[in-house]
């Protein structure tokens, strides 16, 4: 595991219990993409990355399923190898990629879950998540320096 991944895992553990907040990316509240960006901004305090504005119901509209990938491509790259702590998981709900999470150990991840109302632990082994896994991405240190 690379240093950036290790640092991301340490940081995201500290975010457990943060309230869910659509478009949020701070410890006062965050959504799934905001959790990732917020953790990276915390790791790199001079970061100026801003989430793109999107409607609350973005995942219900045709053609909007690439929102998370469009944000992720700025700081990460698709990865086909074994899942490691610090990797970002993408999940498909219906026809679009509608959720992301950060792996912290084995098949355990941390994510901002709207139904739970907070940042919590999830398990890839459960049918709710394992059947919806749509890809793995790895944070790219060079891209983070460019965009953060």
Image: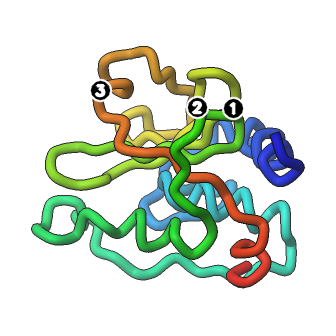
Q: Nearer the viewer, mark 2 or mark 3?
A: 3
Q: Percent from the top left, x then y, of residue 138? A: 63, 53
Asked if marks 2 and 1 touch (Cβ < 8 Å), the reply is yes
Q: Nearer the viewer, residue 75 or 37?
A: 75
Residue at left offset 58%, top offset 39%: 81
N-term mark: 2 or 3:
2
**Can you identify the residue that label 1 sits on?**
104
**Can you identify the residue that label 3 sits on?**
131
Residue at left offset 63%, top offset 64%: 37
Asked which quadrant contains residue 56, the reply is bottom left
N-term mark: 3 or 1:
1
Residue 39 badge: none
Q: Is residue 70 above or below residue 89?
A: below
CA separation in Å, label 3 and label 1: 19 Å
Can you say which quadrant of the picture contains the C terminus?
A: bottom right
Left/right placement of residue 84 relative to residue 8 reads left
Secondary structure type for disc 3: loop
Label 2 neighbour load within 10 Å: few <14, some 14-19, many 20+: many
Q: Percent from the top left, x then y, of residue 89? A: 50, 43
Asked if marks 2 and 3 touch (Cβ < 8 Å), the reply is no
Asked which quadrant contains residue 91, the reply is top left
Residue at left offset 44%, top offset 40%: 113
CA separation in Å, label 2 and label 3: 15 Å
CA separation in Å, label 2 and label 1: 5 Å
Label 3 neighbour load within 10 Å: few <14, some 14-19, many 20+: few
Q: Is residue 143 above or below residue 36?
A: below
Q: Percent from the top left, x then y, of residue 109? A: 58, 31
Label 1 neighbour load within 10 Å: few <14, some 14-19, many 20+: many
Q: Percent from the top left, x then y, of residue 129? A: 37, 27
Secondary structure type for disc 1: strand
**Can you identify the residue that label 2 sits on?**
109
N-term mark: 2 or 1:
1
């Amino acid at each position: 595991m690379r240093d950036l991944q290790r640092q991301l895992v340490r940081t995201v553990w500290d975010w457990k219990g943060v309230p869910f907040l659509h478009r949020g990316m701070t410890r006062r509240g965050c959504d799934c993409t905001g959790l990732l960006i917020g953790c990276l901004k915390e790791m790199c305090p001079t970061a100026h990355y801003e989430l793109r504005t999107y409607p609350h119901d973005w995942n219900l509209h045709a053609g909007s399923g690439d929102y998370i990938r469009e944000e992720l491509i700025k700081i990460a790259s698709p990865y086909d190898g074994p899942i490691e702590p610090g990797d970002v998981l993408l999940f498909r709900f219906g026809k679009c990629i509608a959720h992301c999470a950060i792996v912290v150990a084995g098949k355990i991840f941390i994510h901002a879950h709207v139904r739970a109302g907070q940042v919590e632990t999830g398990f890839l082994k459960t049918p709710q998540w394992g059947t919806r896994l749509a890809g793995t991405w790895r944070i790219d240190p060079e891209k983070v320096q460019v965009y953060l």
